[in-house]
Each structure stands twice: as C-alpha cells, then as structure tokens.
Amino acid sequence: MNRQELDSEYREKTDSELLRLAMNREQLTPEANVALSGELARRRIDSGTHLDAARLEEQDRQADNPVEPNLVEPGILNPAASANHERLLRRVFDRHSLP
C-alpha cells in the first residue's frame, strides 16, 4: 500500500481504531507509521495521554469481556466500556496530573 492509500485509509478510521494501531506500531511498516502519525496529528490526538487511556480501556475490556477484539465491529461501543469511561479518564488524568 502506498502512502496516499494509507492516508486515505487512516482518514476513514475512528479515533479508537487509530489508537489501537498506535498501540502496535512495531507491527506497522515505516510508511504506515508515518501515515498514522500524520493522521493522529491532524486530529490533534495526543498520543501519550490518549494511548494511556486506550491501553487502560483495552485492559478493562479484556478483563470484563474476554472476546476477541476483531469480533467486535469497529465503532460500536460496548456498554461496559461506556460505563467505565469516566473512571478510565480519571485514571489517565490522575496519572498525568491533569485537573
């Protein structure tokens, strides 16, 4: 896949999908990493804070619902994840000393 195709594909992904990719950058090609970084920057997604939140959410999701992540349709919120959202954000904010 060339850079333009990657840019187009990443523009179509949700923030959550991009963050899942960012958690596994070592599996991406150099071109895919550049395209991912560009899309995260375009959306003003701070990779550090948002990745921490995504990791915590993924850990909680796996603990609450040990279903293969690929079996869940992207963009569909798990009700348990919605209920945990505020708690997860507070953990991230506390970790980064944010108000």
Image: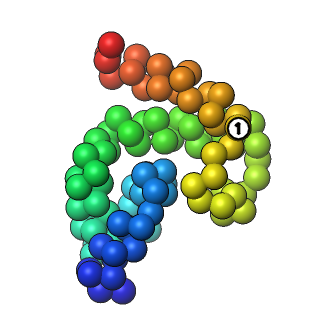
Rendered image quadrant of residue 83? top right
In this rendered view, identify the residue nearer to me: 86 or 1: 86
State the image coordinates of residue 60 (x, y, percent, origin top left).
64, 35
Give the side of residue 99 with respect to residue 85, left or right: left
State the residue at coordinates (33%, 22%): 96
State the residue at coordinates (43%, 36%): 52
Q: Is residue 2 above or below residue 18?
A: below
Question: In this rendering, does residue 7 appear at all?
Answer: yes
Give the side of residue 75 with respect to residue 99, left or right: right
Question: In this rendering, does residue 24 appear at all?
Answer: no
State the residue at coordinates (66%, 61%): 73
Q: Is residue 51 above or below residue 2?
A: above
User: Tell me, what colour scheme is on the image?
Assistant: rainbow
Give the side of residue 95 with respect to residue 41, left or right: right
- The quarter of the image holding the N terminus is bottom left
Label count reads: 1
Three-letter code, disc 1: Pro
| Residue found at the very far bottom of the displayed protein | 1
Q: Residues within 10 Å of mark 1 (few under 14, many from 20)?
A: few
State the image coordinates of residue 92 (x, y, percent, origin top left).
43, 26
State the image coordinates of residue 91 (x, y, percent, origin top left).
48, 21
Q: Secondary structure at mark 1?
A: helix
State the residue at coordinates (72%, 62%): 71
Q: Is residue 10 above or below residue 86?
A: below
Residue at the spot of label 1: 79
- The quarter of the image holding the C terminus is top left
